[in-house]
Image: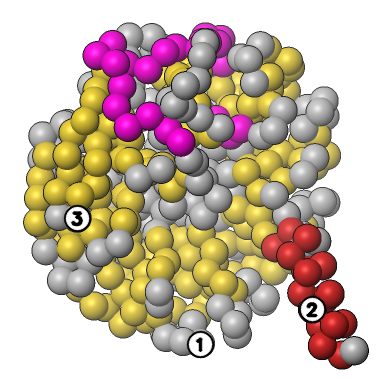
Amino acid sequence: MIRRILQLFLILNLIFPLGSQGQEILQWGGPERSGVFRETNLMKSWPESGPSLLWEYDNIGNGYGSPVITKKNIFVNGEIDTVSYLFALDLQGKFLWKAKIGKEWILNYPGSRSTPTVVDDLVYATTGMGQVGCLDTQTGKERWSVNMMTDFHGPVPRFGFSESVLVDGNTVYCSPGSPDTNVVALDRFTGKIIWICKGTSEMTAYCSPMLISLSQRNILVTFSKTTLLGIDTKDGKLLWSYKQEGQDIDCQVNTPIFENGFIYFVAGNGNGAVKLKLSDDGTQITEVWKNGRCDNLMGGFIKVNDHIYTSGYEKRQYYVVETNTGAIVDSVKFDRGTINYADGMLYLYNEKGQVGLFRPNGPKMEQVSSFRLTRGTKAHFSHPVICNGILYIRHGRSVMAYGVKKGLKE
């Protein structure tokens, strides 16, 4: 009888997960914020002209943040006349509504810089001037709003606030970067402070945080100006930090990755690619290796088995790094840019507007197909999104949807 009750409990847990594990969080970089998208049955090569363009919406304002795709809608930030708006489109690219969030960044590279985070019926959006808004996904009506400069005393970074906030359970995390309110945890329904972490009292970086879930604790991992931080999500205690080396190293952008007890990050300013060992209880880190030649600034990186695939920065090419030793084992000429992964393939989008499909083959990157983007405006900085067989690319004022699923028709 007891055995049957336990079996029933396990089945119910699978059907109705407990706590925050049951949340559907749609966010920056896919489910784990790692640039990996859980897709299947995608094309393994493209026509010479590229995959079919299904639709384009070309009036979302200036910006570089990626769209986020839900079961019904597409949400993306854009700047129009110095104001940041959250745009809602349907899945066919038709405009539904836009909602004002606050003042947007209009200095160097003007436009929105972050990706919205959607949890159930709420969407969280950030502007380059530090406004964090919580809005209703159906109407765009504001539920609450805080400003990282005026409410939390955060100094504005030289390229504007760029963090895509992280949500876990009933908590949303953001990084104002002030000495007294360096990283904060807020109630995601009200915006009220749950805890404050002073970090190392540095200005914030441009990194979107990630979460490590251990048996003993959950750890929020993010960058301040020069330092990687590990913070206990229960009370905001700073567990450990890792200082970058060098000068003028304030552009820590890429979200780290955690896998099998190790933290990996790649930075264009500082130590380059780094592997750290996290203790079993999450309270300590130990450096395993670092490779300063692998210097991706903001294009992200992908780990597949024992290799990291990422762009360089000083040298405008892509690298393959062996994760056991940190050695660069291959380089590919495709200009620098972003990288994502889905269904066994790498998706590259470089700063010259080329989109490439590559096969990760251990220490090699094998180019299969490519096409050039001819739509959109300004710099090619946004990270593409792959969802339900569609490759979404934001280029300035345009969002484009390309069919990359096998047998997908226009």
Q: Is residue 265 left or right of residue 217?
A: left
Give the SS element for disc 3: loop
- Which quadrant does the N terminus fall into? bottom right
The disc labelled 2 sits on which kind of residue? Gln
Which residue lies at the image location 69% right of the left edge and 69% below the top edge?
Answer: 195
Q: Nearer the viewer, residue 190 or 308?
A: 308
Q: Indicate the position of residue 277 as horizontal and vertical percent values.
A: 34, 79
- Foreground pick, 307 / 76: 307
Question: What type is the residue that disc 1 sits on?
Answer: Asp
Q: CA distance from mark 3 to mark 2?
A: 41 Å
Q: Which mark is residue 362?
A: 3
For discs 1 and 2, the disc positioned in front in the rendered view: 2
Neighbour tally class for label 3: few under 14, some 14-19, many 20 plus, Cα within 10 Å: some
Callout 3–callout 2 Cβ contact below 8 Å: no
Q: Amino acid at mark 3?
A: Gly
Dominant secondary structure of the residues highlighted in magenta in the image:
loop
Query: Is residue 4 left or right of 244 when viewed as pictured?
Result: right
Residue sticking out furthest to the bottom: 2
Sequence order check, earlier mark of 1 and 2: 2
Q: Which mark is residue 281?
A: 1
Determine which of the numbered discs, if any, sits on residue 7 in the image: 2
Badge 1 crowding class, 10 Å Cα cut-off, few under 14, some 14 to 19, many 20 or more, is: few
Residue in the image at 66% along x and 11% along y: 94
Percent position of residue 116, x then y: 61, 37
User: Label 1 vs label 3: CA separation?
Assistant: 31 Å
Q: What's the residue at 82%, 25% (across, down)?
A: 139
> Which range is magenta?
41-69
